[in-house]
Amino acid sequence: MGKAKSARKAPGARAPGARPQPKPNPFEVKVNRQKFQVLGRKTRHDVGQPGVSRARAIKKRTQTLLKEYKERDKSNVFKDKRFGEYNSSMSSEEKMLKRFALEQQRQHDKKSIYNLNEDEELTHYGQSLADIEKLQDIVDSDSDTEERGTLSAELTAAHFGGGGGLLNKTASRVGEEGNQAKSRRELIEELIARSKQEKRERQAQRENALDLTDKLDQDWKGVQMLLSHRKPRTEDREQPQKPQADTYDMAVRELGFDMKAQPSDRMKSEEELARDEQQRLRRLEADRLRRMLGEDGQRERPKHTSADDLSDGFILDKDDRRLLSYKDGKMNVDGDVQEEQDGGASGGDSEEEEEQEPESSGEDTEHSDGADSHSDLDSDMDSEGDHEGPEEGQLPAPRKRRGGTDPHAQAAARAELPYTFAAPESCEALRSLLAGRPADEQLLVVERIQKCNHPSLAVGNKAKLEKLFSFLLDYVGDLATRDLPELSVIDKLIPQLYNLCQLFPGAASEAVRFVLRDAMHDMEEALDAKGRAAFPGLDVLIVLKITGLLFPTSDFWHPVVTPAMVCMSQLLTKCPVLSLRDVVKGLFVCCLFLDFVSLSQRFVPELVNFLLGLLHVAAPDKPAPGYTLVHPFRALGKHSELLLVSNREDGATWQQRGLPLHWANSLPAHTETEANHARLSCVAVALALVDRCVMLYSALPAFQDIMQPLRAVLTEHLDLGHPLVLQEMCRNILARMGAQGERCRPLVCEKSKPVPLKLFTPRLVKVLEFGRKQGSTKEEQERRRLIHKHRREFKGAVREIRKDNQFLARMQLAETMERDAERKRKVKQLVNSLATQEGEWKALKRGKFKR
C-alpha cells in the first residue's frame, strides 16, 4: 500500500529529462485595466504574458515555417513536365512548335529583353540556316575537304596508339615477302612520305576540278552570248507602245532636279550687330576727317611690271620732243624750259580738274574703305615710295586726290554730321550736341550715341546710357517749355526713349518717377502757400504722355503708371480752371486718363466730374437739377461762365477742329470771335470725351446712376442754340445712354434673417448610448462592424507576415554563421596541418630525422 502511494506521481511533478516551464517575468506581464466596471460584460485578455506567448509563437513557426523553408528545394515526386504529352487534342506538330517556343523562351537571357534588333538564329544539325543558304564552302588548301576533321587509321595508330600495332603489321608483311625487317625509324619516315604524297594528290585533284569549273564558266559565257539575239523590228512595231507619263509624274520628276535650299548664314547676335555698327561708324568718321583735312582719300596701287617686260604696248600721249632753235647765235634753252614749265602747270591743273570726283555719300565711303580696299597696303607702299622711290621694273602711279585741294569739299566735310559721338556726361552737353540742328539730325545724333556706346562694347557704357535717358527726358521738357513747343522733335525722340527704356527699365522708371515726384512737390508747396495750385506746364504733361507710351497701363499696380494716375487725379481735383489754357490742359489730362484705362476699363470719378464741370461752365448760369458741382468747379463765381459763347452768330462761322497742344503754354492774342471759336472747340472735345466715357463704362452695373448728371447737363445743352455739329453730338450721346440698360444688378448686402423671440419651450436632448453608432440602421451597423473586423484582421496579418520574415531572417543568419564557423574550423585545421608539415620538412632538412 505504501509502495503504491510512493509510486504515484505528484500533481506538480515533471517527467525526468523534461524541460522545465519558464516562469513569466513579472515585469513583462501586461495588465489591461478598465476605467470602470460594467455589470454583465465579460472581459478577456485582462492579463497578458508576452514572454510565454512569444515562446509559443516561435515553437509554432519552428514546426511549420522552418520545416517548409528547409524542404523548399526537395521533392520526392517525379513529374512529367513535357508540354502537351498527355493532351490528346493537340497534334504532334503543334506540340513540337510549342515546345520549341518554350525552349527559346527559356534560353532567352534576361539581358537581351531590350535588344529589339536581335534576330532569332535557326539551326539544322548544329549549323546555322543562314550559312547553309549562302552555299559558301570555303576551301582550305592545307586540309582535306572530303575528310575534314577525320584522321586515317594508320596515322592514328602510329601517333596516338604508340605505333606498335602499325609497325608490327608492317614488319610482319615485310617478313612474309622475304625482305629484311625495317627499323622503326624507317617505317615512320615511310609513313610520313606516304601521307605527304596523298596530300599532294588531293591538292592536284582539287586544282584540276577548279580549272575545269573555270573552263566551263568561260564556255557557258560564250554560249550565252550566242543565245542572246535581238528581235526583228517588225516584232518591235507590233508591241504596244509604253504609256506616256502623265502631268503628275512629270512634275514629280522635275522636283528631283530642283535646286535644294542652301543653308544661309547664321543670324548675328545683338552684341555682334552692335560691334559691326560701331566699326562702320568709325570708318565713316575716319573718312570724313580725311576729307575734311584734305588728305588723300584713295590712291591707285602701282601696277607690277615684270623684269622681262619689253614695254611693247607703251604709247606716248604726246610728242614731248624739243625743237632745236638758236637765238643770237646760241642755243635757245631757257625758252623751252619756260614753255615746258607753263605747259606742265597748265597740264597739271587740267589733270587735277579731270581727276576731281564728286563727293560720295557716307555709304559710298563706307564701301570704298571696306575690308577689300587694302588701305593698309597702300599706306605701306606710299611710305616706302617716299623714302626709297619706285622699285626697279615699276612705274610710279599718279595720285588721285578727293577734295584734297578743293575748299568746297573740305567745307562740305566740315558741315557733314559726325558719325561717332561720345556719351554726354551732363544735360548741358546733350543740349550743346543737339542745339541748332533740325529734327532729323537730332534723331541721328541720339541714334549714333546709342550705337557707339552700346552696353556690350565696354564696361561703363551701361551707366552712360542710363544717364542718357534722364538727359533726354530733361531735354524733352526743355523743348516743351519753349514759346513754340517743338512737338515734331519730341515725337521723333520718343522712339529713342522707348529703346532706352527697354534696355534699362529700372533706370527709366526711376527717372520718370523723379520728374513726377518733383511736380507733385511743387503742387503741394503751392497748396500750402496759396491754398490753390495751377496746372503744371506742358513739360509735365508731356512726361505723363510718355509714361503711357513706355510702360504698361493695364496692370493692377505699376511702380510708374500708378503714381502717374494719382498725379493726374490730383491735377483734375486740386487745380482750378481759371482760363482757356487751363481748360486745354485739363482736357489733355482727360485724354491721357482715357488712354490709360482703355484696356483695364477702370472707373475714374475725377474724369467724369471734370467733364461734368466743363459742360456746366459752357452752359448759362442757372440752377441745374439732378447734379451738384464739386471742387475745382463752382456753380457761381467769376469763372462760372468761362466756356459760355457770348455771341451766337460766331457759331455759324465756327469749324470743328482739334485743339493745338501749344495752347497749353500760351494762347495767341485773339479777338472775341476767335475766343468764341476756341470755346466751341473745347466744348466739342469735351463732348467727344463724354462719348468715349459712355462707350467705356457702359458695362458697369451702376452705369445709369453714374451718367445721370451728364444726361442732365447734356439735355440742358440742347436748348443753348449750339452749332448743329454739337447738337448732333449731344443727341447721339443721349441716345447711346438710353440704349444701355441695366445689364447687371448692383451688389447689395444680403438681408439678414430676423432674430426670433425667446420661447419657454423645453429643449429635448437625446441621450447618447456609449459604444454604439447613432443614426444608422441595422444593415449599416453590420457593414461598419465588418469593415472594422477586416481592418483588424488586415493589421494582424501584416504583423504576422512581418514576424515570419524576421524569423526566417534569423534562421538564415544562423545558417550563415554556422557555415562560416565550419569554414573557419576547416581552414584552421588545414593551416595547422601545413604548419606541421613545414616544421617536419625544416627538421628533416636540418638532419634531425632520418628516413
Image (cartoon, rainbow, N blue to C red):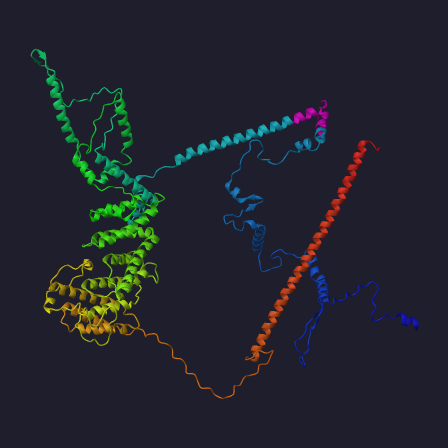
Residue lying farthest top? 329
Q: Is residue 222 left or right of residue 827?
A: left
Q: Residue furthest front?
A: 529
Picture layout, residue 544 above or below residue 710 = above
* Dominant secondary structure of the residues highlighted in magenta in the image: helix
Q: Is residue 3 above or below residue 77?
A: below
Q: Quadrant of residue 320?
A: top left
Number of marks in picture: 0
Q: Which quadrant does the C terminus fall into?
A: top right
* Residue at 79% over, 37% down: 839
Q: Residue at x 15, y 67 (%)?
A: 725
**Which residue shows up at 79% across the image and 39% down it?**
836
Q: Is residue 173 magenta?
A: yes
How far across and how far down the image is residue 767, in percent?
A: 57, 83
Measured from the top left, where is residue 815 in percent x and y? 71, 54
Tell which of 728 and 582 is nearer to you. Answer: 582
> Foreground residue, 399 or 532?
532
**Residue 624 image position (x, y, % from top left):** 21, 75
Question: Dividing the image into 4 quarters, which one contains the N terminus?
Answer: bottom right
Q: Nearer the viewer, residue 207 or 436?
A: 436
Residue that extends furthest to the left in the rendered view of this protein:
328
Left or right side of 575 for 192: right
Residue 415: name its quadrant: top left
Q: Which residues are the magenta region?
A: 169-191
Along the viewing direction, whichever of 78 and 162 lies nearer the viewer: 78
Is residue 380 shown in magenta?
no
| Residue 214 visible in image | yes
